[in-house]
Image: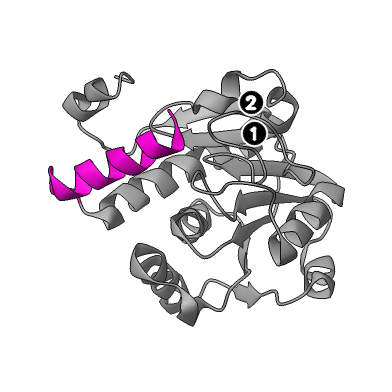
Amino acid sequence: MKREDVRRVDQIAIGTYGISGLVLMENAGRGAAEHIAALHHGSGADVKRPVCILCGPGNNGGDGYVIARHLELLGFPVRIVSLVPTDRLTGDAFANAAIAMKAGLPIQVARSAEDLEQLLVDDEIVVDCLLGTGATGAPRGLYADAVTVANARRGVRVAIDLPTGLDCDTGIPSDVTFRADMTVTFVAQKDGFSNSEAKPWLGTIHVVGIGVPKMLLMEFGVA
């Protein structure tokens, strides 16, 4: 799928089929959380590794708040590092951030590279929910800092939908790209994933359905 396909599938699922954006986000986040939890089950470790979820301003960040809630339910120590104050979020992302806050999930706001250096530590599962499929070009400012710090830490890195800095359509990585050990992508693999240049940044790829009707998927050739 191309980024425009992703946008249109969401738009039609919501506008034509009447599936709310919150339902789609819930399905996406829960499915992603299950794949992240499977990392522990496959490791043979007795203690569940802490999870740090990096959240950006849009729906990719909103997915992160859902993922955090479900991982906590699965017994994982979870914390959220947001690159924007939660009161600046809108729509479904704001709704899920509000749920996370009411549920007592720890949310820390990073405002500088120095904050990120302190907040991201070794031996965690770091989850990239920063920008999502709609982003183009290299991440800038604090987003570039977050990717750089995350890549420098020991631990497991998981990208949600696609790694920040990797182009959805072309698969060309930018100079600053999140290096994932696992990518959990929604609905279908993105066109860029087939580019050999993308492979080192994606890790193992898992596709999660979000409840979009098969009839709609068939329109986009991904059923």
The residue to which callout 2 is attached is 204
117 over 158 or under it: above or below: below
From the viewer's perspective, is residue 6 above or below residue 75? Answer: above
Crowd band around label 1 with a 10 angstrom C-alpha radius: few (<14), some (14–19), many (20+): many
> What amino acid is found at the position of numbered circle 2 in the picture?
Thr
The span shown in magenta is 1-19
Mark 2, Cα crowd under 10 Å, few <14 / some 14-19 / many 20+, is few
* Numbered disc 2: secondary structure: strand
Q: Earlier in the sequence, mark 2 or mark 1?
A: 1
Answer whether residue 14 is magenta in the image.
yes
Left or right: 79 as drawn, with respect to 57: right
Q: Pointer 1: what residue?
A: 182
Residue in the foreground of this view, choosing between 46 and 125: 125
* The quarter of the displayed image where residue 166 is located: top right
Residue under the point 13% across and 49% down: 18
Say what amino acid the circle numbered 1 marks: Met
C-beta proximity under 8 Å, tags 2 and 1? yes
